[in-house]
Image (tube, rainbow, N blue to C red):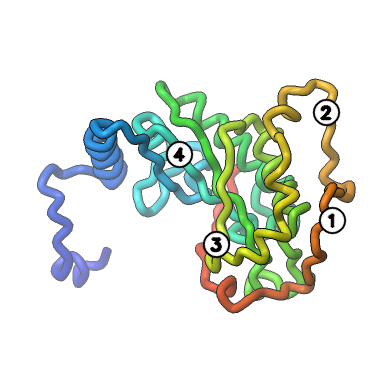
Amino acid sequence: ASDVYKRQVDYHNRYGESKVQAIQRFVQYACDEIHKVGAYVSIDVFGEAANPGYTTAYGQYWPAISNVADVISGMPYPDHFSKGYYGVSKPWNSPYQILYQWGLRVMDRQKVTPTPAVVRTWVQAYNVMRHVDPNGIAYNAANVEREIRGLYAAGLTGGYITWHSGSNLEKYGRQLGAFKRDYLADYKNPNYKFDPAQPISYDDEESEEPTGGEVKPEEAKPCLLYTSPSP
């Protein structure tokens, strides 16, 4: 922060903690208190927190949080990644590939965490936003499924949760086929093969979503764009 902001804002950091220390110690405190009533603690972190050796500007250091929380939920929404991130040309149009590459990095982060949390990942359930790509894909059942398959293929089998800022039940209804899959059973089946390039069919035919970057007003909100790809 600039000197002006330093004079105006008092963060009450009486212990001289770094951002990482402050967040981890708060999560430790929260877990101690919440565990007393028999509840679990889940912490959301930005998708970029998965990058090796990386700490977000907000002090989110994956191993520090994963080591004390019960569940850690990254937010790697495909349309938050910039072109070429993790070697994926258009991450927003490549739900399987970008979530798979992200998942591999999460697995590496988990390996260096002494007592890692369960990883339950947020997946994108809204269409690609127009300001990202006017010709972005619609996140219908098939593309939501590709996201989830990418996570499981990387070894992240702790489940998923979906993000749609408008909580549009009509759209969720059209995505229902993706939520009926037994991804864990498929992951454990050595004979199961998934090709993200192939069409996906469902017993209950899902309504076709419009393409061409068509987005409902509640979906057209600013997003944080991850622009520092790591190898």
* Residue 62 located left or right of residue 27: right
Q: Where is the C terminus found, in terms of image quarters?
A: top right
- Ranked by sequence position, the earlier of labels 4 and 2 is 4
Identified by mark 4, the residue type is Ile
Secondary structure state at the residue bearing disc 1: loop
Along the line of sight, the residue nearer the viewer: 179 or 48:
179
- Residue 39 occupies which quadrant of the picture? top left
- Ranked by sequence position, the earlier of labels 3 and 2 is 2
Identified by mark 2, the residue type is Tyr
Identified by mark 3, the residue type is Leu
Q: Nearer the viewer, mark 3 or mark 4?
A: 4
Are there few (<14), some (14-19), or many (20+) residues within 10 Å of tag 1? few
Q: Nearer the viewer, mark 3 or mark 2?
A: 2
Instruction: For marks 2 and 1, give the CA distance.
Output: 22 Å
Instruction: For marks 3 and 4, give the CA distance.
Output: 21 Å
Question: Does residue 15 appear anywhere in the picture?
Answer: yes
- Residue 169 occupies which quadrant of the picture? bottom right
Are there few (<14), some (14-19), or many (20+) residues within 10 Å of tag 2? few
- Ranked by sequence position, the earlier of labels 3 and 4 is 4
Question: Does residue 21 appear anywhere in the picture?
Answer: no
Secondary structure state at the residue bearing disc 2: loop
- What's the residue at 77%, 23% (across, down)? 189
- What's the residue at 28%, 47% (across, down)? 19
In the rendered image, residue 155, in percent from the top left (x then y), is placed at 64, 30
Query: Which numbered tag is attached to residue 225?
Result: 3
Secondary structure state at the residue bearing disc 3: loop
Identified by mark 1, the residue type is Glu
Instruction: For marks 1 and 4, give the CA distance.
Output: 34 Å
Contact, CB < 8 Å: mark 3 with mark 4? no
Are there few (<14), some (14-19), or many (20+) residues within 10 Å of tag 4? many
- From the image, tell me which residue sits under label 4: 72
